[in-house]
Amino acid sequence: MKRLVVFIMVIMTLHVADAREIGSLFGIVTDRETGAPIPYANVIIVGTKMGGMTLTDGTFVINAVPAGVYTIKAMMMSYRPVEIHGVVVEAGITTRVDFQLEVTIVAKTQEIVVEAELPQILVTESDVSHRLSENEIHKLPVDDVVEALALKSGIVKTGDQLHVRGGRSGAAVFQIDGTPAHDPFAPSTPSIDTEDVIAACTYPRKNARLAALSHMMRSYHPSLRAYYHHNTEEYEAIDENRFLEALETPLSTFSIDVDAASYAIARRFMEENYLPPRDAVRIEEFINYFAYSYPEPVDDVPFSIHIEYSGCPWNGKHNLVLIGLKGKKPPVEERVPSNLVFLIDVSGSMEPPDKLPLLKRSYLLLTDRLKDNDIVSIVVYSDVASLHLRATSGSDREKIRKAILALCAGGSTAGANGLSLAYKVASETFIHGGNNRVVLATDGDFNIGVSSTSELVRLIEKKREDGIFLSILGFGSGNYKDHRLESIADRGNGNYNYIDDILEAHRVLVEELGATLYTIAKDVKIQVEFNPAMIGSYRLIGYENRKLPKEDFTDDVKDAGEIGAGHTVTALYEVVPVDNDAVRTVYELNYQETRIKRSAGNSGEILTVSVRYKEPDGDESKLITTELCGSPVSLKKASDDFRFSAAVAMFAMILRDSRYTGEATFKKAFDLAKSAKGDDPYERRSEFVRLVKRAKVLRKLDK
């Protein structure tokens, strides 16, 4: 048995060593005269069996290339082939090679004389679907034959499916009257009844049957789209918080949550004219998407605590308690230098416009906000993880921009390898006393190596002890893995946002850059003690996957959430006064007696809020405590922030089909939010009001 274990360990070591001896090639093939990308051109490594084919944007990737010096050749029908000599491939590095091809067109009327019998396609150069020997396969960083196939350029693995040379949505290019169109059935596509069509870059020709077929398929586009877009998005089921008796369970403990991904995901669904899946709606993330005007922190405390007490808009017999934290926002010039590692998913699933193309533009926004004393590295992963850009000063923004623009998609998704390499790079460039952070951008669809959520969480938990924080930016749809990204962010001292368009990228990476990238307090926990003489029962609205046992509040080993510079965090409790018996239940116990102190009824206190936090580089927590006293004010007299957060919670509860919606309606949420917009410089609250109106229409359609 020991011999077997040793043998397996040796094989694994050799496997890792082999993986480190390979690099990759990528580039763009364009028309020399027009600069337009050339799809489906062949790119080969001369003298080898390795090569690839360009995608619709002219980009190609050749993975698993042994380190060495090569001659690379690009070929396309009607173009002169071009060779580039002396291309150096380094282990673990992606090397860029671009080609510009010149047109060499044979006129239609020109006579062609065949002087020799030659095959129409030279297999030695054009056929890049080569055979691999057993030894070559063993050296590949793969676990099965499907992953081995996915290493081949032109073949992409998405989930459990292989897409070969254009065999997926958006991968085939069409030109209609000279206009490129990835989806010939889209409503914006020009009519093709009488136009020339170029499919997969073949030569132009009139084809009435093709035009008629395309026109017919466009007519059936709505029903066909359901088959084209197989949705494999994943959201974790939520067990909604219930009412608890204050007499029996006086303590409510939870970790703060500054994530806002859920709101942006739901907005994307509704803007595509669908209501979001109920488990995609996390109420606390809806509420915390918006900023609130809580008092600024004072003295050396990194955040302030704000409490409000008013009526509940969906249940007149209940009240709401708002607990808000606001993080200190130091001036830009006082921010510590940052060591940022951009970890970017460049696998084949990232090719659509709402993924890698949007991701690249988002990172360009972040690059423009870098300070000269910041450091940026870029790690990419597809079939393997590699260092795309070594540590570069923030003052050299042009170099960083070029590296971002050079990214292209292809291959499988070795996300765990990418995370490991990114943390390794961040450790090597660690700035003591600075902001050290990995910024991961992906659709969350990992399919090579460690891919289960639990394994990824354990990997992240080991890395967070090194003082390196994590920000996650989610992109795309169709195969999006929300539950995985949220779990990783929660366990990795991180925050999680979803980027559905460039405006959301601007919000996260420009307007709220400090909150996204600069942590001012970590492991922030809230514990609320309810006075049973005043409160009969209560329930925490949202935060279902952030609840903690009461014992964890004083345990500094237990992980919790982080607050970024200038961040606001809001939590709502729905409470039932003691004079309301609607929810209160009395339990007769055989072995113990629970009593209320006499002083509790005379104190005037409703509850006590305790907050524990650590400094970003600290190990021991600090405690802040405050009380809520007095009677609730009427909802009309409550602040705009209170009423707007209540409207957002009510809207999210309706979307989730909550059992506690009571008298909640879209109209009530609409009217309350509209009256509480207050100062709305970015019109996000106005956008929310419009979103409620859209949801109301969509709900009618679903009935």
Image (cartoon, rainbow, N blue to C red):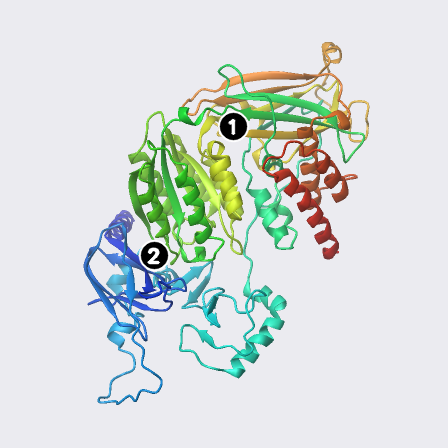
Q: Which mark is residue 321?
A: none
Mark in the foreground, 2 or 1: 1
* Residue at x 39%, y 40% (from the top left corner): 367
The answer, for residue 51, to whether it is visible in the render is yes
Q: In the image, is residue 615 above or below residue 239?
A: above
**What's the residue type where badge 2 is placed?**
Val
Q: Is residue 317 left or right of residue 697?
A: right
Can see residue 459? no
Mark 2–mark 1 CB contact (< 8 Å):
no
Q: Position of residue 697 (x, y in %)?
A: 72, 52
Please state which of residues 375 and 141 is positioned toward the viewer in this rendering: 375
Q: In the rendered structure, which disc, 2 or 1, sits on the residue that comes first in sequence?
A: 2
Q: Quadrant of residue 438?
A: top left
Q: Which mark is residue 566?
A: 1
Q: Observer-nearest residue: 392 or 572?
A: 392
Tell me the crowding category of disc 2: few under 14, some 14 to 19, or many 20 or more residues within 10 angstroms, Cα based. Answer: many
Element at label 2: loop
Disc 1 crowd rating (10 Å Cα; few below 14, some 14-19, many 20+) is many
In the rendered image, the vertical position of residue 264 relative to residue 96, given as above or below: above
The relative height of residue 284 versus residue 625 in the rendered view (above or below) is below
User: How far apart are the two marked residues, 2 and 1, measured between alpha carbons?
Assistant: 44 Å
Q: Secondary structure at mark 1?
A: loop
Amino acid type at mark 1: Gly
Q: Which residue in the protein does label 2 denote?
A: 142
Tell me how many marks there are.
2
**Residue 223: quarter of image:** bottom right
Q: Residue at x 27, y 83 (%)?
A: 119
Question: Is the C terminus in the top left, top right, bottom left or bottom right quadrant?
Answer: bottom right
Q: Quadrant of residue 100?
A: bottom left
Name the residue: 45% across, 29% down: 519
Q: Position of residue 22 (x, y in %)?
A: 25, 54
Where is residue 698? Give x, y as percent: 70, 53
